[in-house]
Amino acid sequence: MKNNILIVDDIHPVFMEQAEAKGYHCDYLPLIKPDEALQIIGNYAGLVMRSKFKLNRQYIDAGVNLRFVCRAGAGMDNIDEAYAAEKGITLINAPEGNMDAVGEHAVGLLLALMNNFNVADAQIRAGSWQREANRGYELKGKTVGIIGYGFMGRSFARKLSGFEVNVIAYDKYKTGFSDQYAREVSMEEIVKHSDVLSLHIPLTAETEGLVNEEYLFHFKKPIFLLNTARGKVAQIRAVLNAIKQGKILGAGLDVLETEKFPNLAEQEWFEELRQSNKVILTPHVAGWTFESYRKISEVMAGKLGKFMVHR
């Protein structure tokens, strides 16, 4: 029990290999149901999870022997962090493992939006050849505003470094982070100068609904909007209204307020979102590449050493 780890989601085998080399015993149960996990979680010192369930008070109380929880990814919004800390449980995530994937995905979305890739592709497949209607924008000389300058925001800025853009960044919880990739600015400067707005912040009580009608109203120029963070950070109705008003030229959304079907199709805004040729959608895969699948597990395993109990 002292060094047992329960793994409830699919992760790369390299985690088990490296954890067991350090002396841990791993029970890999990626098909386990949430109620089944609740029944056995008390037998483990460690838990590895992605998004199978919310690690709330019920699970934490049942995990009487838990010393650490690994979240295979960056976001911790499905974990009651405050209660876990109260119980002395250390939380481990692995943003280093998928930051390159997220940075590249954001660049891909931006280039596709600015050059009408999705629209032009659909038109040609339908037998329509429209050059002028698909005239694009160049990134060079544009100002890219980044909200949140952690692993993901910095990765995006680094990927942009060859495009000769002006990258500015705002982070409420950091100061003095200007580097060769981005210049630290106030939110007022983000709103005033950005041609592109990219979100790289976790979902918290403060950030939920940050991008709403009022927030978008204050931007001085039409923008391209990217969200590869968490869906509830940006209100989709507000985004669609800003597109109709010309305040948003295009939106690349890897995450949505509601995800997965059938619930997604039931949202009042879904049909308008589906039909908009100003939006590119991907199914929450920005950080989910073949490479990040392995790297996330390697990062988590690398952070395990201090939890080992020697009999």
Image (cartoon, rainbow, N blue to C red):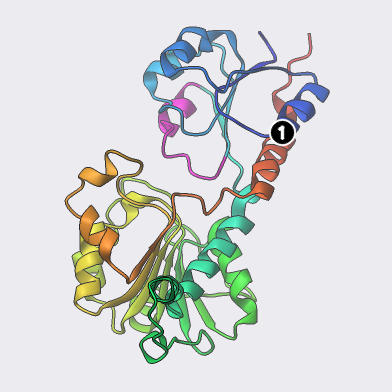
Three-letter amino acid code at disc 1?
Ala
Q: Say whether residue 160 is left or right of residue 126.
A: right
Give the x, y percent position of residue 244. 20, 74
Judge from the rendering whether residue 149 lies leftward or rightward of residue 290; answer left or right: left
Q: Residue at x 65, y 80 (%)?
A: 162
Range drawn in magenta: 73-87
Q: Position of residue 232 (x, y in %)?
A: 32, 50
Residue 86's spot in the image, x, y percent? 45, 25
Dot 1: what SS?
helix
- Residue ranking furthest to the right: 21
Instruction: Say if 280 sits above or below 9 in the image.
Output: below
On the question of residue 188 being in view, the answer is no
Residues packed near mark 1 inside 10 Å, few (<14), some (14 to 19) or many (20 plus): many
Image quarter of residue 224: bottom left
Q: Residue 259: image x %, image y %?
A: 34, 44
Q: Nearer the viewer, residue 148 or 52?
A: 52
Query: On the image, numbered disc 1 is attached to which residue?
Result: 301
> Overall secondary structure of the magenta stretch?
loop
Residue 180 in view:
yes
Q: Residue at 33% across / 77% down in the picture?
A: 191
Q: Quadrant of the C terminus?
A: top right
> Relative to 163, is 17 on the left or the right?
right
Residue occupying image coordinates x 26% and y 78%: 247
Viewer-side residue, 168 vs 242 = 242
Q: Is residue 71 left or right of residue 148?
A: right
In the image, residue 195 lies in the stretch drawn in magenta: no
User: Of residues 158 and 33, which is closer to you in this image?
Assistant: 33
- Quadrant showing the N terminus: top right
